[in-house]
Amino acid sequence: MSNIIVFFSIVQRLEFHPKDISRVNNTNDWLRRFLIHHDLDIKDALSMLWDTCEWRKTNKVNEINEQNVNIEYLSEGSLFVHGRDKDGKSLFIFKCKKHVKGQKDFEELKKCVIYWFERVERQDKGNQITIFFDMADTGLANMDMEYTKYLINLCKLYYPHFLNYIIIFEMPWVLNAAFKIIKSWLPSKAVQKIKFVNRVSLKDYVEADQALKCWGGTDDYEFSFQPEPALSDGKVEENKKKVHFADGSPLSDNSPSSFGDSKQEEPCKSSKVKISPVDAIVFAQEGIEVLGNLSITNTSDSFISYKVKTTSPEKFRVRPSCGILAQGHTVNINVVVQPGYTGSNILRDKFLIMTFVIDHEGYSTNELNDLWKVNKNK
């Protein structure tokens, strides 16, 4: 833990951008992404965080906006964000046929990519994206390996835990060799995110109403560049998160890896409890155990019983996993990773928190178990 404290004290003295220092000091969400990106390896996560802050300073990432990027490049529609995949992640669309290698200033192109990455991060509060390569009607002239490598390296080196899928739509066979090279640039867990699709199989990843008509969907959207809407308070909000523990990405928020980005800490609309943290449990080494924590607060005006379940009970020890909460009371729950399981083993696992109202808190353990049997569908 001491090396983390030293790291943050050094960050304070360096001339990194104030917004990035603020993200480090005041929120957990950005830091959580670095940890997840490196399977909870703190040393590697801190190294990436350092490199990212340096890169952002060198490239003046926080200053990139519509006034200092090439507006013609933004307006032509070769890169834009529209629609969402089945996991609710924004589609970062690369219309490959509109890009011809060597015809544009590469440095300006890179700034455009950063502009869109930063914009979608602000829009989705750090949630993941799916990069969608629309390769319909493309040929060798449209295949820019340097550009593609730059895009991949951004996700690999400077935007942690940012990539949900890479969808390749209708790739011409003539480009097969090029994509074998591209795969070699990716770590193995990223290679698994690549999905080759056509008009028929796209529905496995993108619903028809989110798919453009040119992909076989029903969305008749035509790209027209619109400036980024101003936030109501003039600030980028980094730590607004909401609770979805039940279905995996809010805690499916980062499907297929469900221990990632989180959203605003607020009660579920249909729930009588507030759950914290939100969307993702962060695990850390404590002695010989890998331990995470969550809390449940009864926000109703009645007694409630709660139960915590997981998709992989063999991987976790949850204590307490069931109990009673009085009005306004909070229970802190420890989630311990069982020996033999690592960060990469638990990334897909999900938790479900169930509750129902009871009339008093004097039930015995056996009586409470009987109540859960009766209320198992509530």
Image (cartoon, helix red, strand yellow):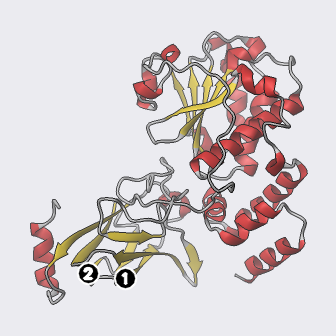
In depth, the one of 79 and 266 nearer the eye is 266
Q: Amino acid at mark 2?
A: Gly
User: Local crowd at mark 2 within 10 Å, few (<14), some, or many (≥20)?
Assistant: some
Left or right side of 229 for 57: right
The answer to whether the residues at label 1 and label 2 have Cβ atoms under 8 Å apart is: yes
* Residue 48 x, y percent position in the rendering: 76, 59
User: Local crowd at mark 1 within 10 Å, few (<14), some, or many (≥20)?
Assistant: some
Residue at position x 81%, y 43% in the image: 64
- Residue 252: mark in rendering: none
Which quarter of the figure is the N terminus placed in? bottom right
In depth, the one of 37 and 233 nearer the eye is 233
Left or right side of 120 for 68: right
* Residue 186 x, y percent position in the rendering: 69, 40
Instruction: Give the Cα separation between the discs numbered 1 and 2.
Output: 9 Å
Q: Which residue is mark 1?
A: 331
From where the camera sits, is residue 341 visible?
A: yes
Q: Which residue is mark 2?
A: 323
Task: State which quadrant residue 67 falls in.
Answer: top right
In depth, the one of 337 and 322 nearer the eye is 322
Quick check: 92 above or below 333? Answer: above
Residue at position x 48%, y 24% in the image: 211
Badge count: 2
Quick check: 129 above or below 283? Answer: above
Residue at position x 52%, y 14% in the image: 214
Q: Callout 2: helix, strand or loop?
A: strand
Q: Amino acid at mark 1?
A: Val
Residue at position x 78%, y 75% in the image: 8
Q: Callout 1: helix, strand or loop?
A: strand
Task: State which quadrant residue 288 falls in.
Answer: bottom right
Quick check: 149 above or below 221? Answer: below
Which mark is first along the chain, 2 or 1? 2
